[in-house]
Amino acid sequence: MQVTTNSKLSYTEGTQPPPLYLAWTMWGVGAFFYLMGFYLRVAPAVLADTLMIDFGITATALGNFSAFYFYSYALMQIPTGILADSWGPRRLLAWGGLAAGCGTLLFALAPTITWAYLGRLLIGGSVAVAFVGLLKLASHWIVPQQFALVAGVTTLVGVIGAVLAGVPLQLLVAVVGWRMVMVVSAGLLFAIGVIIWFIVRDDPRQKGYASYAANDTSTGTPSLGQALGSVREVFRYRNARLLFLIPGGIVGPVLTFSGLWGVPFLTTHYHLSNTAAAALCTTLLVAWAVAGPIFGALSDKVGRRKPLYVLGCGWLVIGWSTLIFVPSLPLWLLTMLIVVTGAASGCMIISFSYIKESTPPRYAGTAVGIENMGVMLGPMLLQPGVGWVLDHLWDGHLAGGLRVYNLQAYQVGFTLMLTWTILAFILIVFTQETHCRQLVEA
């Protein structure tokens, strides 16, 4: 063993890698924060009618409310990647949990929609650190050959949070009200932040084990010039530029449908109950979550990134086209279509390994942050975009004080989703295969 010190931490470096239970514990503790972040991400789908009545808002305002999460989330991705490389994930995840708790409490107590916007903005910016922080932890604690699998499992954990924001959240809100549920959620986030601070460590060397990122020499907080330089360096690579634009066309439709507009669409045009519609939207998310690790593991096994990604995007074009433009599908066929479309969306998880391998290792956190920013551009733009279209095409029909939108309005709005999906399919064809090998700088 040898004792090593740098400006960031001191540790005793061992020769053996960390045991699996310890490695996955480090990741798992942080994963609870990601679960809560995803739960808060899609909660507006179940709360939509309640929020529109309580705050007296339209579909455009509701779309903006949901998108405020993504505004700050997307803006935080590149800073998060840079800070993950310099500060380390432990501090990011711990402080992120505490800040998310504050945002959730502000939302729970909001007297007007403006305060709710602010709470949502703080939540999004805070939980923005979760995914990148978890992947940064994984790059130190877990064998590199399992990186795509870890990214997929991380998404699976997140979607478990989305499942909790479906029928379980709806039942809880019916019993105690949405404000009390959000107060309890805030308390859980405060607890998670404290637990991460005391349990998680950035690197196995802090526990006396060998690190899988021994060559990671990032130290200190970069200057603004250095940070911008890191971003410019990542965007020098063609794959990085393409992969920044592609995932929004996959995740955007999933979260726009399941996270906001799917429930009112299904209740209005398929005459499903709120519970049944929420269950179908949750099914879409579950299929996406389960398929993510499968796509990641298959990609690792075959040693290719591009073919599976092309296959997934191709099916998504077919799946969303059918769902949008073929009305009155039988319930069994609608359910099957939602399952397969959700599963095909799991191809997106390949993006993180793809961009990591396409850029130099020293920019790993920055590259993943840029990729996650691209992911969030989809729901950030599509959720309010669909809401704007719905309000623009509203025919004046009201039911129970709520606006009811006709099928044509939904079809035009959802065409925004489909257009980005088609663009993603085209762009992925022009990426360069990495063969699952990390780029080595000359």
Image (cartoon, rainbow, N blue to C red):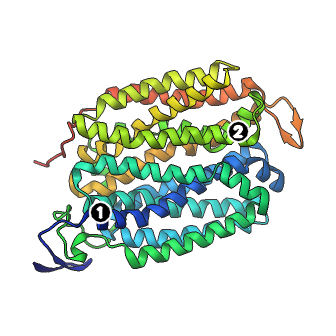
Crowd around label 2: few <14 · some 14–19 · many ≥20 (10 Å): some
Seen in the image, is 182 located left or right of residue 201? right
Seen in the image, is 280 located left or right of residue 269? left
Seen in the image, is 380 located left or right of residue 62? left
Instruction: Specify the label residue 226 is tagged with.
Output: 1
Q: Quadrant of residue 389?
A: top right
Q: Amino acid at mark 2?
A: Ala
Q: Quadrant of residue 210?
A: bottom left
Percent across and percent down for residue 121 are 60, 60
Closest to the observer, 192 or 310: 192
Seen in the image, is 24 located left or right of residue 1? right
Percent across and percent down for residue 217 are 19, 67
Quadrant of the rendering where the N terminus is positioned: bottom left
Q: Looking at the image, is 93 positioned above or below residue 145?
A: below
Q: Secondary structure at mark 1?
A: helix
Residue placed at 82% from the left, 56% from the top? 54
Q: Amino acid at mark 1?
A: Gln
Q: CA distance from mark 1 to mark 2?
A: 51 Å
Q: Is residue 184 visible?
A: yes
Q: Which label's residue is closer to the chain start, 1 or 2?
A: 1
Q: Secondary structure at mark 2?
A: helix
Q: How many marks?
A: 2
Residue placed at 58% from the left, 62% from the top? 123
Residue ID for mark 2: 276
Crowd around label 1: few <14 · some 14–19 · many ≥20 (10 Å): few
Percent across and percent down for residue 436 are 21, 40
Is the Cβ of the residue at disc 1 closer than 8 Å to that at disc 2?
A: no
Q: Looking at the image, is 63 positioned above or below residue 135?
A: above
Q: Residue furthest top?
A: 326
